[in-house]
Amino acid sequence: MTDTATLAGLDPAILGDLLRVTGSTGFDRWRDQVRRTGGCANPIHLSGWTLTKDKTTGETLHRYSTDTEPDGRLRVACGNRRASRCPACAWTYSADTYHLIRAGLAGDQDKDVPVTVRDYPRVFATLTAPSFGPVHNRPDSGRCRCGVQHPPEDDALGTPLDPTTYDYAAAVLFNNHAGNLWQRFTNRLRREIAARAGLTQRELKETARVSYGKVAEFQKRGAVHFHAVVRLDGPDGADSPPPSWASVQLLSDSIRAAVAHSYTTITVPAAADQPARELRWGTQLDIRPIRAFDAGTDITEQAVASYVAKYATKAAETTGTVDRRVGNREVLVLLDVPDHPRRLIEACFDLDALYPDRRLRAWAHMLGFRGHFSSKSRCYSTTLGALRQIRADYRAAQQREELGLPDPDQDQDPTVLVLTDWQYAGQGHSPGESILAASIARDLQLNRETAREALHDQLVLEGVRS
Ligand SMILES: [Zn+2]
Ligand SMILES: [Zn+2]
């Protein structure tokens, strides 16, 4: 828990609240509740009751009410996936993404993805944005164009050398269309694959399918790029082996051709002072084969899965922008948003009236990007929803057991009547509770990471993993 060194630096008011919480009679139960949310930083509070009655005798078999809970409330996890809003729930989301990507890479019998996908042609591809003007960087040669050798943590990195000539409008329009560009890319990719295999589009559908899982990430300059695992499956997806012509080489060549093709370009019409623009992917394209075992320069499944999961929770906030919708320009000053992201957000405001259907103002806090941070094609692997369901089922079963409730799956028994009434009673923590919840989250995360590493070590010993 919280050690004395941290307590010493605390605001006396927060310390007072911390002592109040830990000294209260309901503290053990409160800690239990918060542990169950994974140490959620902003839990939702519910008040209410459930009652299980025997229909025939009218006898009450079980009753649970939040009346006996601390403050008369039950706390449930907020489920926010942004690390700046709730590190605990974001961690859970990232762990889910890890399992999702990993299942698509390595197969997972528990989640209905056959282990044979490991033999299918697979690559890890990174599609980037083009240049919108020179930015401060750390080239291999050492010195940035501005003459300075920037340290790795320098805030100047990724910001324009000359903000007056940087094309902010193009930068946010690119982010805004990134999802559409991805769509075009995947459409074109199918054509490129078909052409290389000497098939028509229809024939391709009958013999192979392209599956992918992808995540969006913001580069420091505030441009979206995509990391994707692209896999060639048989016609029924992961369950069917790919045809004999399917190879990593063919897949890589097709990706390269699809990215460069003129179809993978979107024209944004001229409007007022804005010229017409051709939006396309940047020339920086990284494609790496994925092998099940470490073979020199190729990357392993494990590395890809953790890399992708890490970025799933890193939203636009890593570029210094804000983590919620921005109402007006004044807020940017109040929130002390750094110059570069502020200019990007303002570009969204400025362009909003010119391209109303692009909803740039609504997505200004995402620097124009309106897509999801992680998504996948239908056949890639198990879904995040399915994983959440597995975990929710597990938690519900645990709770039922504790409360002595019957299992609803087995309970086709019409003799039992369950009545419930739940109400929203608020959200969040008091300052003292926040500190305790954060330490609970840290402990849980540490435990789970240790468990994950132990499993990995064991698999290495068994020779299953590299
Ligand atoms: Zn949460
Ligand atoms: Zn520089």
Image (tube, helix red, strand yellow):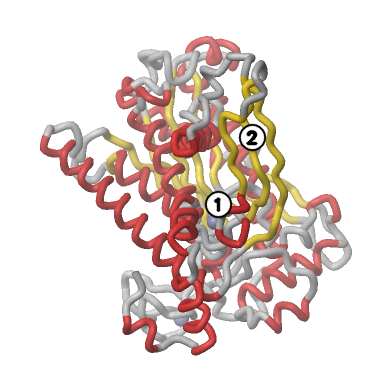
The reply to whether the residue tagged 1 has its Cβ within 8 angstroms of ligand 1 is yes
- Asked if the residues shown at circle 2 and circle 1 are in contact, with their CB atoms under 8 angstroms apart, the answer is no
Query: x, y percentage for residue 51?
Result: 64, 34
**Residue 11 placement, left or right of 275:** left
Q: Residue at x 55, y 35 (%)?
A: 385
Mark 1 secondary-structure assignment: loop
**Residue 78 placement, left or right of 285:** right
Q: Which residue is drawn at 50% across and 76% down?
A: 20
Q: Residue 106 or 127: which is nearer the viewer?
A: 106
Q: Residue at x 67, y 43 (%)?
A: 180
Q: In which quarter of the image is the N terminus?
A: bottom left
Q: Name the residue under label 1.
A: 77
Mark 2 secondary-structure assignment: strand
Q: Tell which tag, 2 or 1, sits nearer the viewer.
A: 2
Q: In which quarter of the image is the C terminus?
A: top left
Q: Which amino acid does label 1 sit on?
A: Ala
Q: Residue at x 83, y 56 (%)?
A: 355
Does label 2 or label 1 sit earlier along the sequence?
2
- Say if 144 sits above or below 110 in the image: below
Query: x, y percentage for residue 306?
Result: 36, 48
Q: Residues within 10 Å of mark 1 (few under 14, many from 20)?
A: many
Q: Residue 326 or 17: which is nearer the viewer?
A: 17
Q: Mark 2 points at which residue?
A: 51
Q: Residues within 10 Å of mark 2 (few under 14, many from 20)?
A: some
Tell me the quadrant of ligand 1.
bottom right
- Say if 143 sits above or below 429 in the image: below
Query: x, y percentage for residue 23?
Result: 45, 73
Using the rendered image of the protein, determine whether residue 359 is visible from the camera's viewpoint.
Answer: yes
Q: What residue type is labelled 2?
A: Leu
Using the rendered image of the protein, determine whether residue 257 is visible from the camera's viewpoint.
Answer: no
Q: Residue 120 or 324: which is nearer the viewer?
A: 324
- Say if 408 sits above or below 281 in the image: above
